[in-house]
């Protein structure tokens, strides 16, 4: 049985209870995983020569932060009613406000921006706002998920 | 490492193309590095049970690997101010040594002289299938 997402949750904010610390090893392991040997990910000397205090993060590294906080976010909120087995990842956007470097201690809050029908499917859009230790913005990560076949108009036709 | 100059990023400039392979080993590494352990990325049994043809790559693994087209071109990866994609098709990864090859093209489609930024549009393909579409990076140059 496919149930529509709960649109009352648009605007709900989830504040993550702990911090996420970016270390040189976190950056190193992520850079290896994406097959990228850029010296600014591996060498503090190279990063300093480029004007950074320490090695820098690849543009998509903070996806690891979103998975760290997955269990505190909207995807597991029983009130939202997302069935993960019918959901696929639609869009992803990283908007960086400043570089992420080793030593950063980050926090995050997740806001549900959008829940709407697109044909028989529904789109769920949410933003993970990543903040530094001074609560200054570091990065906004926008994610959309497509919930297949759960649009209200589809009820009765999707069994 | 030197940052690309704004003067070298005219609209229409093609970035050096990139081809990379995604193997099962890559996916296991990416599971560990990203913390995304969804079994559709490592278990054929789970993937086929939910109707997928095979284990598929994490969309963000493909996105992360494709991003190198832009970060290598920019010089300093932190010059990438924005990076966005739409995942238009799954990337199946067979259990063999060759894996799946992704080809990435990128072109400068807009520039902003006051902000010294270039907008780059990327396309990711597996064979004839487009797997990354509406892929855009905004890069601040010197």
Image (spheres, coloured by chain):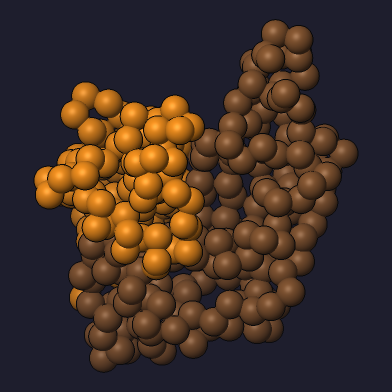
Give the residue displayed 67% in from the left and 37% down from the top. A83
Residue B130: horizontal and vertical position, in percent? 31, 29
Q: Residue furthest left?
A: B98
Q: Residue furthest right?
A: A8
Q: Is residue A39 above or below residue A15?
A: below
Q: Is residue B123 above or below residue B66?
A: above
Q: Residue furthest top?
A: A157
Q: Name the quadrant of the N terminus of chain B.
A: bottom left
Give the residue displayed 68% in from the left and 49% down from the top. A75
Residue A159: horizontal and vertical position, in percent? 69, 15
Q: Colour of chain B?
A: orange
Give the residue displayed 31% in from the left and 84% down from the top. A47
Q: Name the quadrant of the C terminus of chain B.
A: bottom left
Q: Is residue A16 above or below residue B114?
A: below
Which quadrant of the view contains residue B28? bottom left
Q: Colour of chain A?
A: brown
Residue A81: horizontal and vertical position, in percent? 76, 39
Q: Taking the image as drawn, is residue B74 in sight? A: no
Give the residue displayed 59% in from the left and 32% down from the top. A86
Q: Is residue A63 left or right of residue B89?
A: right
Residue A17: horizontal and vertical position, in percent? 74, 74
Q: Nearer the viewer, residue B10 or B98?
A: B98
Which quadrant of the view contains residue A67? bottom right
Number of numbered discs visible in the structure rendering: 0
Q: Is residue B19 left or right of residue B111?
A: left
Q: Taking the image as drawn, is residue A72 in sight? A: yes
């Amino acid at each position: 049985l496919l149930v529509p997402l709960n649109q009352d949750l648009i605007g709900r904010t989830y504040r993550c209870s702990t911090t996420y610390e970016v270390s040189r090893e976190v950056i190193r392991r992520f850079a290896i995983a994406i097959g990228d040997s850029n010296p600014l990910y591996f060498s503090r000397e190279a990063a300093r020569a480029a004007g950074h205090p320490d090695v820098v993060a690849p543009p998509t590294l903070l996806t690891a932060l979103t998975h760290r906080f997955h269990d505190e976010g909207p995807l597991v909120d029983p009130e939202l009613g997302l069935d993960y087995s019918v959901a696929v990842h639609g869009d992803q956007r990283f908007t960086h406000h400043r570089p992420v470097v080793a030593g950063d201690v980050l926090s995050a809050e997740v806001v549900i921006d959008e829940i709407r029908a697109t044909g028989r499917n529904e789109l769920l859009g949410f933003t993970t706002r990543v903040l530094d230790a001074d609560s200054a913005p570091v990065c906004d990560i926008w994610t959309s998920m497509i919930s297949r076949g759960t649009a209200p108009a589809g009820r009765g036709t999707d069994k | 490492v030197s940052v690309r100059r704004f003067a070298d990023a005219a609209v229409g400039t093609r970035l050096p193309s990139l081809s990379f392979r995604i193997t099962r080993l890559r996916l296991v590494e990416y599971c560990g590095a990203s913390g995304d352990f969804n079994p559709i990325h490592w278990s054929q049994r789970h993937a086929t049970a939910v109707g997928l043809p095979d284990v598929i790559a994490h969309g963000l693994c493909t996105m992360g690997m494709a991003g190198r087209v832009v970060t290598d071109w920019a010089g300093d990866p932190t010059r990438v101010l924005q990076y966005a994609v739409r995942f238009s098709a799954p990337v199946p990864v067979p259990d063999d040594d060759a894996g799946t090859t992704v080809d990435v093209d990128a072109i400068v489609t807009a520039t902003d002289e006051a902000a010294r930024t270039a907008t780059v549009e990327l396309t990711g393909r597996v064979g004839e299938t487009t797997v990354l579409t509406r892929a855009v990076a905004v890069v601040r140059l010197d």
